[in-house]
Image: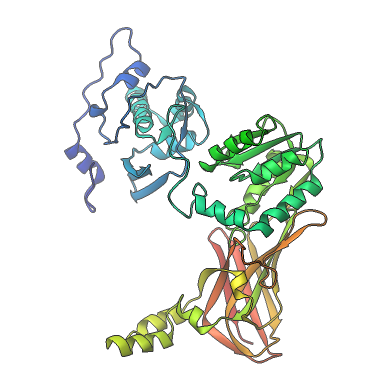
């Protein structure tokens, strides 16, 4: 495998390391397609790792990109792909190929979509050879290739720990189940976006739904499909692999179930995903679970030991200087000049000193979200005396007519699976009870941000 040296022209390195392609000569009856599929990979300049098993690829082979694929852009023209722990080097059209095969389609269909990007027979041949090599490397997968179902990366949705936390959060799952049972009728078609292990899709089917479409982009969907069969529901639940924005359903749904509320409530793109589903996948009067989402900020005084575990403090810098005979004050000063954010279970913050009532940051009707950019500021009055050094972000959501879910520190359970974002002020504000202060919140393309100011 080649590793390119920084600072040297990518194409010059490529030419120096790879054999040039010879002029193209076709037999009278040979097509570009046949030459592309039969061409020797050794003549292809991009060094891709072969799968150990020979595989036959035809124009009718259905392909889809591997789930949980890592992509690294090391320079403008350099792409590396990580699949099954193996590194695969890319091509100028690699990203276009991966986008085209984000949903399952035949090789012929995919290449036809890519044709407008090509100029001449040589480019067509190179592209088909590249698709073939990506297939052999496991980047594009057909019916005879599958990656391991469970990913080893604990933070990915294809890994067990994420789903273990959610299933162990009985309050979360049982509350969603309650809302589904209250809402679903035998006439309803349900779409479940981000089905994961399939627990909410199964709940909808058992509640009497006419049919359920369970959408899942990670490899966990394959296990969910097996779970549907084990529970005798294969005829009533259809697994739809892929991202909801990139798929179509054979019919419009009456109910949308989407538990895609993030630790920072909007960071799993619930607004964008729901907006797309409402416009394309649902009937005009469809019902949503959840219906609405309210986001709050709770100003608190975070404990000193908790702060010292997450940011550089002057106390820590003084302690380290005593231990190691080195001045660490620059660390504390840098930390003091900016705000910080960490993730913490709100249950663990239930005893922290609260300096005001929760402040409403955003109230969102998920069926009619017009603006995905949020900006607010509020004048708040302290109810206790203390140092305002942190703001806990939590949410409350209305799931159905009579069912709500909250992870307010006083309502969250020990099994709460959400690690809420907590903003830590670089410049804390000392407050007396009854004293006003200003809090600002914004959410946009780059995520959320906070500002806390005194009078």
Judge whether 21 appears above or below 151 on screen: above
Residue 21 % position (x, y):
22, 27
Single out the residue that lies furthest toward the top: 28
Residue drawn at 58 percent across, 72 percent down = 450
Single out the residue that lies furthest toward the left: 16
Judge whether 298 appears above or below 436 on screen: above
Q: Is residue 248 visible?
A: no
Question: What colour scheme has been applied to the protein in the rendered image?
Answer: rainbow
Residue 359 % position (x, y):
70, 74
Judge whether 381 appears above or below 269 on screen: below
Residue drawn at 59 percent across, 62 percent down = 418
**Which is more toward the observer, 310 or 233?**
233
Residue drawn at 62 percent across, 74 percent down = 440
Quarter holding residue 185? top right
Q: Is residue 241 visible?
A: yes
Left or right: 432 as drawn, with respect to 4: right
Left or right: 23 as drawn, with respect to 36: left
Quarter holding residue 121? top left
């Amino acid at each position: 495998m080649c590793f390119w040296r920084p600072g040297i022209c990518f194409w010059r390195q490529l030419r120096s390391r790879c054999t040039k392609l010879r002029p193209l000569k076709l037999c009278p009856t040979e097509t570009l397609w046949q030459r592309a599929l039969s061409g020797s990979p050794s003549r292809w300049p991009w060094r891709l790792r072969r799968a150990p098993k020979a595989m036959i690829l035809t124009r009718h082979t259905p392909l889809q990109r591997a789930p949980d694929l890592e992509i690294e852009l090391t320079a403008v023209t350099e792409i590396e792909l990580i699949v099954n722990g193996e590194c695969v080097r890319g091509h100028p059209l690699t990203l276009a190929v991966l986008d085209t095969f984000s949903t399952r389609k035949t090789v012929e269909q995919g290449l036809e979509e890519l044709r407008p990007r090509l100029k001449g027979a040589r480019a067509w041949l190179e592209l088909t050879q590249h698709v073939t090599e990506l297939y052999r490397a496991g980047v594009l997968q057909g019916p005879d290739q599958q990656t391991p179902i469970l990913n080893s990366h604990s933070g990915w949705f294809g890994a067990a720990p994420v789903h273990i936390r959610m299933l162990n959060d009985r309050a979360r799952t049982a509350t969603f189940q309650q809302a589904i049972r209250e809402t679903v009728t035998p006439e309803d078609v349900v779409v479940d976006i981000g089905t994961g292990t399939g627990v909410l899709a199964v709940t909808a089917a058992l509640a009497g739904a006419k049919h359920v479409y369970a959408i899942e982009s990670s490899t966990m969907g394959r296990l969910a499909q097996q779970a549907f069969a084990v529970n005798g529901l294969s005829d009533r639940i259809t697994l739809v692999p892929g991202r909801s924005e990139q798929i179509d359903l054979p019919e419009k749904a009456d109910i949308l179930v989407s538990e895609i509320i993030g630790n920072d409530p909007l960071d799993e793109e619930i607004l964008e995903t729901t907006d797309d589903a409402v416009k394309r996948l649902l009937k005009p009067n469809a019902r949503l679970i959840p219906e609405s989402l309210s986001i709050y900020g709770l100003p608190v005084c975070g404990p000193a030991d908790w702060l010292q575990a997450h940011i550089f403090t002057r106390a820590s810098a003084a302690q380290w200087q005593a231990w190691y005979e080195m001045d660490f004050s620059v660390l504390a000063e840098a930390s003091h000049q900016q705000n910080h954010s960490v993730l913490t279970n709100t249950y663990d913050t239930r005893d922290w000193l609260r300096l005001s009532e929760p402040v409403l940051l955003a109230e969102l009707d998920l069926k009619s979200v017009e603006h995905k950019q949020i900006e607010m500021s509020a004048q708040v009055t302290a109810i206790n005396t203390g140092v305002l050094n942190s703001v806990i972000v939590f949410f409350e959501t209305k799931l159905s007519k009579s069912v709500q879910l909250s992870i307010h520190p006083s309502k969250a359970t020990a099994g709460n699976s959400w690690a809420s974002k907590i903003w830590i002020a670089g410049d804390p504000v000392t407050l007396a009870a009854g004293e006003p202060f200003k809090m600002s919140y914004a959410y946009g393309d780059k995520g959320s941000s906070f500002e806390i100011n005194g009078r």
